[in-house]
Image: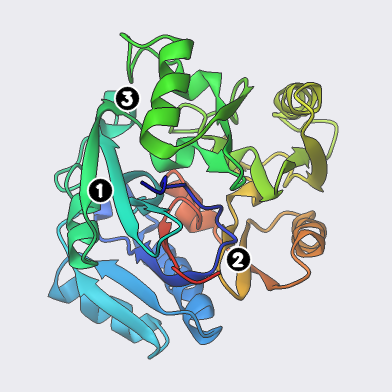
Amino acid sequence: MTPYRFPPEWHPQDWLWIGFPHEAEEWPGFLEPAQEQIAAFASAVADSGQPVRLIVRDEANAARARALCSSRVTLETRRYGDIWLRDTGPLVMLDGAGNRRARRFGHNGWGGKYLMPGDETIGAELAASAGLPVATAGWVLEGGALDVDGTGLVATTEQCLLSPNRNPHLTRSDIETRLGEDLGLTRVLWLGDGLLNDHTDGHVDNLARFVAPNTLALPRATGADDPNAAIYADAKARAEAAGVVVREVPSPGRIERDGRVEPASYMNFAITTRLVVVPVYGSPYDAEGVAAIAELFPDRETVGILADAVLAGGGSFHCASQQMPSLQG
């Protein structure tokens, strides 16, 4: 039997699923601008020539999306809670014989903090709608907790995967074994903590992203008051000690809302077939951050899109999307 593998995000994609904000209580004071920013993201990808399936909650939500989005964006009405399809959507694997299958995991509301009806079922529903066989593993894992380079190497954080609020019965060794059994991942790069005040307990997709085999993009602290300077330095040291090539990107620096440090990161970029979409926050470092990421993807256009309202809900563009890898490429 040909083994299945978890392809990297730069593998060609047939379409991109994106979640559209709908619950005002989850976006107090930010629902409308968050919808506008997600619509801008979806439209940019669709207008680049890649199909986008924007997931909406009901007809009123769909009407709002239609008014904001490019006509190239396809809407699908589904039952879901939050928009973070990176975590709740299907992780699609490929084999070498032209087959795809979806893997799902247990979902407990990001460690019991954000339990919303539909989030535990949307992944299997999307997989079924795409005609994919889907299997659910017997442990809790969100897709944003992992980033892969396509060779079997995966990056994650100790803060999230070793947190007792996910799988208290599993050791580090147990988790490494399960990553191998369930996703075909053979080597784990354990980073330490994720960003300060990250709602997800430190998902790696807000800290570190593979941009090529064995090559990891990491933020570089900007400004004397960057709240994550020590976290970035620790991640770089761990990656280099593991023999991983590090490419640094300036961070947005210190971003606050109502006196609270926000987990703003350019690392939450979404890689699509023709386009890389980088979240920006009105930081003086936005242009530099987008330019640095563009250098990492010379075969794609790179754009920055404002995501400060999306961040108010706890994530950004990568968190809100999940790709369908193509059988070609």
Q: Is residue 161 left or right of residue 124?
A: right
For disc 2, the neighbor class at 10 Å (few under 14, some 14 to 19, many from 20) is many
Front tag of 3 and 1: 3
Image quadrant assignment for residue 208: top right
Task: Please state which amino acid type lies under the numbered disc 3.
Answer: Gly
Tell me if I can see residue 87 in this picture: yes
Tell me the SS state at disc 1: helix
Position of residue 89 relative to residue 169, above or below, is below
Q: Name the residue under label 1.
A: 25
Q: Residue 111 carries which label?
A: 3
- Measure the C-alpha gap from mark 1 to mark 2: 27 Å
* Residue in view at x 30 percent, y 84 percent: 66
Residue drawn at x 51%, y 52% as measured from the top left: 7
Q: Disc 1 or 2, which lies upstream in sequence?
A: 1
Q: Which amino acid does label 2 sit on?
A: Val
- Judge whether residue 263 can be spotted in this image: no
Q: Do the residues labelled 1 and 2 touch (CB within 8 Å)?
A: no
* Residue depth check, mark 1 versus mark 2: number of the one nearer the observer: 2
Residue that sits furthest to the right in the current view: 224
Q: Give the camera-side residue of 224 and 66.
A: 66
Is 246 on the left or on the right of 168, as rendered?
A: right
Determine the image quadrant of residue 131.
bottom left
